[in-house]
Image (cartoon, rainbow, N blue to C red):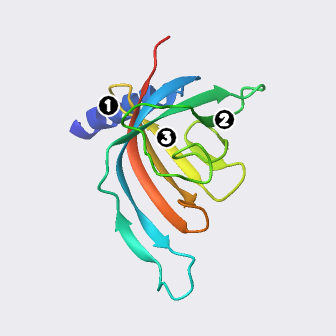
């Protein structure tokens, strides 16, 4: 009968997690890990190379908004000028989401390119994220980056 107790506990955990739907709000987020593949556009510069970002953590501000029909969510990066912002120049003013992303509250896709983001809620209420997408630091160079980090809801 030990297995039935485990099954009940797992069912309760799954139910609690399912009820923990995302909240339309602003979030203070921190990139804790970043790696990728970088290519330089100059002829003769060699093949793309892998990298691990050592200038972490960096922070950004994320907004999650429920869509008008409440069937999904929109993610957008909001202005953030703190001293811990990623100071590299990208193709937009943002450091992570270079367009809006649409999704179901867990899985999001960029509305303009191939980027994606997955969000999950930890037991303490903190969101974790995994993001991957193309970015263009310095203009014509191309990086394919993957990031992991945490977000805390900003209380108004």
Residue 132 point in image, percent of width and height = 51, 56
**Local SS, label 2:** strand
Q: Which mark is residue 74?
A: 2
> In the rendering, which numbered label is found on residue 119?
3
Describe residue 33's horizontal placement relative to residue 140 as left or right.
Answer: left
Residue 39 higher or lower than 30, as above or below: below
N-terminal-most mark, 2 or 3: 2
Q: Which residue reaches farthest right?
A: 69
Question: Tag 3's secondary structure?
Answer: strand
User: Nearer the observer, disc 1 or disc 3?
Assistant: 3
Residue 2 falls left or right of residue 27: left
Report the disc number at residue 66. Answer: none
The answer to whether mark 2 and mark 3 are in CB contact below 8 A is no
* Residue lying at 67% horizontally and 42% vertically, measured from the top left: 100
> Of the residues under marks 1 and 3, which one precedes in the sequence?
1
Judging by the rendered image, the residue that carries numbered circle 1 is 9
Sequence-wise first label, 1 or 2: 1
Q: Residue at x 47, y 31 (%)?
A: 81
- Residue at the image point whose x is 64% and y is 27% from the top: 65
């Amino acid at each position: 009968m030990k297995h039935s107790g485990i099954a009940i506990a797992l069912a309760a955990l799954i139910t609690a997690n399912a009820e923990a739907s995302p909240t339309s709000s602003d979030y203070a987020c921190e990139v804790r890990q970043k790696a990728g593949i970088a290519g330089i556009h100059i002829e003769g510069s060699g093949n793309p190379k892998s990298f691990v970002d050592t200038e972490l953590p960096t922070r950004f501000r994320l907004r999650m908004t429920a869509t008008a029909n409440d069937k999904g969510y929109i993610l957008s990066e909001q202005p953030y000028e703190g001293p811990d912002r990623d100071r590299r120049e990208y193709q937009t003013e943002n450091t992570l989401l270079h367009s809006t992303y649409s999704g179901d509250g867990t899985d999001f896709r960029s509305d303009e390119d191939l980027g994606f983001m997955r969000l999950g809620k930890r037991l303490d209420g903190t969101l974790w994220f995994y993001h991957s997408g193309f970015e263009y630091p310095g203009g014509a160079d191309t990086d394919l980056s993957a990031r992991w980090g945490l977000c805390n809801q900003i209380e108004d």
